[in-house]
Amino acid sequence: MTHQKPLAIGIIGAGNMGRHHHRAVADYGAEVVAVHDMRLEAARELASHADAQLATTALDAFFDVDMDGVVITTPPPIRLEPIEMACDSGIPVMVEKPPALNMVEGRKCLACIEKADVIAAVGFQLRYHPLYERLKALIASETVHLVRTACTVDYYLSFRMSPWFLQYEISGGPLPEQAVHVLDCARFVMGNPKPVQAHALAIKNMALERTEFDAENAIQMTYQLDNGVFGTHMNHCGTEKFSFEVEVVGPHLRLQANMVENAIRGYLNGEPISETVVLENGSSLDKTGAWLRAIETEDRTLIRSPFADALQTLALIDAAVQSRDTGRFIQVEEL
């Protein structure tokens, strides 16, 4: 099945990510027809840019508009209701990361999606980045024993972010707000192994005078995947320079993919590797484009981060978050 007219898309959440998705929708050749936000002014501003017919603060009015898909870019605690309403109408969804705030909510969302059998993607853009596509190809037939990831951002230095990013009750802290990207990427390059257990140490020891922010700035995480790989993750959100890094180690390889440098360096089977990666992935689609193409063609294999798999990354994150107050490893099956 192919659509003869442009796909009609609704956006819930008119902040930075809502604006990003509008641009991606327009670049694809689809159109935004409705915008929802709790702030009417923000909804109207994005609707004006998109020439959308509706800007509203009411979900009922939003879902009265005929749509081929809904993009959900709300803060993580606001996932279940819009997903439920989309599923009740049989509308495909693109949900920004993380797929939910925790596994309790995530399972409820997945139940709605599976019952309605709608196309559902999660916005893990790194799965479409040619750097990690190339790393995945390089290690496809290799043995990997260890994976290390790192994420650094400057939030506690610059405060150039939405305030809720550093408010634990809304964002869940740096693990679901920042680390989730590279931890999901680590799963992707290894073929989507599932998490077994995780542990994290975390502290806020910066900007102590900013009591409105309670998210930690320094986190060290250790975990196990069901393919036998042990992983570590370092996260710091008060560092001058941004970085996303994924490193894999095995008997005959040590490769690091650094997104800032857009390069893979190390060695593989005795040969040095130093590659700068091309700017386009094999599908020529980003996360939004892959979802839109899947709606048009009904080919769900185009989506590299379906909701059900994204929930495995959330389980890894949630286990680490739960461990912080216990001092012990949390088994994913406990969640």
Image (cartoon, grey):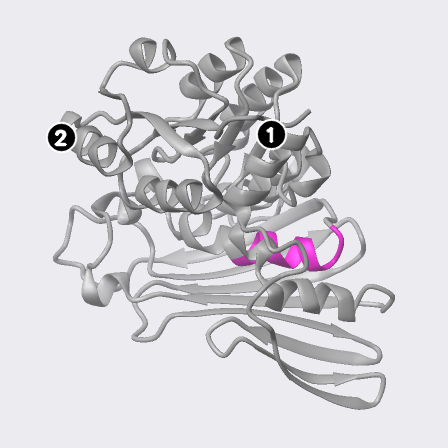
Circle 1 sits on which residue? 295
Tell me which residue sits at (58%, 16%) in the image.
112
Circle 2 sits on which residue? 41
Q: Quadrant of residue 58?
A: top left
**Real-space Cα distance between discs 2 and 1?**
30 Å
Circle on res. 88: none
Quadrant where the C terminus sits is: top right
Q: Amino acid at mark 2?
A: Glu
Q: Position of residue 176 (x, y in %)?
A: 45, 46
Of callouts 2 and 1, the N-terminal one:
2
Q: Amino acid at mark 1?
A: Ile
Q: Nearer the viewer, mark 2 or mark 1?
A: 1
Q: Position of residue 231 (x, y in %)?
A: 65, 62
Tell me which residue sits at (53%, 25%) in the image.
104
Q: Considering only vertical position in the picture, is 250 above or below 111?
A: below
Q: Is residue 203 left or right of residue 278?
A: left
Q: Position of residue 202 (x, y in %)?
A: 41, 57
Residues rendered magenta in the picture = 182-191
Secondary structure mostly seen in magenta is helix
